[in-house]
Image: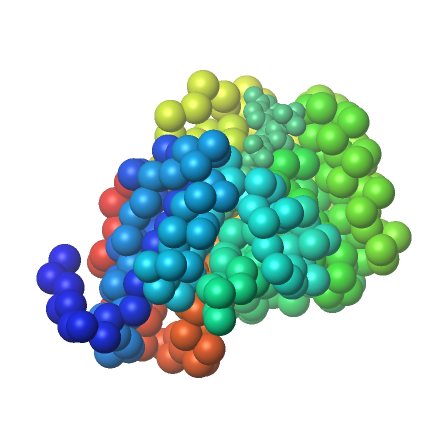
Amino acid sequence: MRVNLENTTQKLCVIGDPVLHSKSPLIQNTMLEALGLDYIYLCQPVTPEDLPSFLRAAALLGYRGLNATMPHKQALLPLMDTLSEDARRFGAVNTVCIRGGKFLGYNTDGVGFLRALAENGTSPKGLRVTVFGAGGAAKAVALKLAQKGAARVTVCNRTAEKAAALCTLDEQGVLRSAGFDIETLRREAWQTDLLINCTSLGMHGTQGQFDDFSFLDELPAGTPVYDLIYAPPQTKLLAEAAKRGLPAYNGLGLLVHQAVCSLELFTQTSIDLALVKRALQGVLAGP
Ligand code: NAP
């Protein structure tokens, strides 16, 4: 990718450990170029012990903001001057704006997932949602769907205590926890209007895979199946869902929409979504 650097060019980056696999620089630089914004977005490995000093350095160097991935999302919380409502509720920061030497922490995962859903014509209002997993992504998705009017959100997780802990954060009283054994998944599936996999099962580079997809047979016809994973672009879960005629969506929608939300915060402008989506077409193809 060709980047034009001016003396006035504003700096952004993604931090993580590891981070070199991140698609954020590709997505953000493509969007910045398409929008004609004078910014550059870099990829910055930062170890956990270097996080506080990196933040101070970023402010000193005039960075306008940064995105954070594993393992920094929780560690950033106490380092922020202010936290958005979502960052506080989800207990994680994935976007930091640096303004006037102050660090403002946000979390764009919940809103990003809502926008991805809306793009496919789905509103969470009144839906019975089943979420697989109770990690960081599941927390953002489940709590946001509850806040936006889902009738019920069932959190199915391998480690029961983590699902139970997530449900205690729900202010709407619509979250409930359940197990991750196949009988439970089959039983929950037939009362599900929207299924979302927020576990790492099926992701490139991890060992785990679903060993039984029979829960998909129990879903009502037409139930959308989302997998937050985008590498590979079609997980086994999505392939099995498509085989059964169910609408199946990967994690690219969330990836792009949370990036757009971050860019809106960094630049304090609204983004022309149609324009950036055209620019991203093709750029994001492949594993
Ligand atoms: P996380 O906090 O580490 O949570 C991982 C979840 O997966 C936990 O609920 C864990 O269950 C479950 N899990 C892992 N291995 C399992 C296995 N063998 N069997 C059953 N459950 C298993 O990770 P995260 O940040 O929430 O991310 C979860 C997934 O979402 C990842 O694949 C990530 O790539 C994807 N993601 C995508 C986007 C996007 O932009 N599209 C954004 C964020 C995350 P336990 O609690 O029992 O360990």
Residue 272 visible to an observer of this rendering: yes
Q: Quadrant of the N terminus?
A: bottom left
Figure quadrant of residue 286:
top left
Work out whether 262 lies above or below 232. below
Figure quadrant of residue 181:
top right
**Is 15 or 211 nearer to us in this picture?**
15
Work out whether 103 lies above or below 207. below
**Residue 15 on image: x %, y %:** 39, 45
Give the residue at x 76% y 40%.
Answer: 166
Give the residue at x 47% y 41%.
Answer: 51
**Is 209 or 241 nearer to us in this picture?**
209
Which residue occupies the extreme right position in the image? Answer: 173
Q: Quadrant of ligand 1?
A: top right
Q: Quadrant of the C terminus?
A: top left
Direction from residue 124 to residue 265 in the image, left or right: left
Direction from residue 130 to residue 68 in the image, left or right: left
Residue 92 visible to an observer of this rendering: no
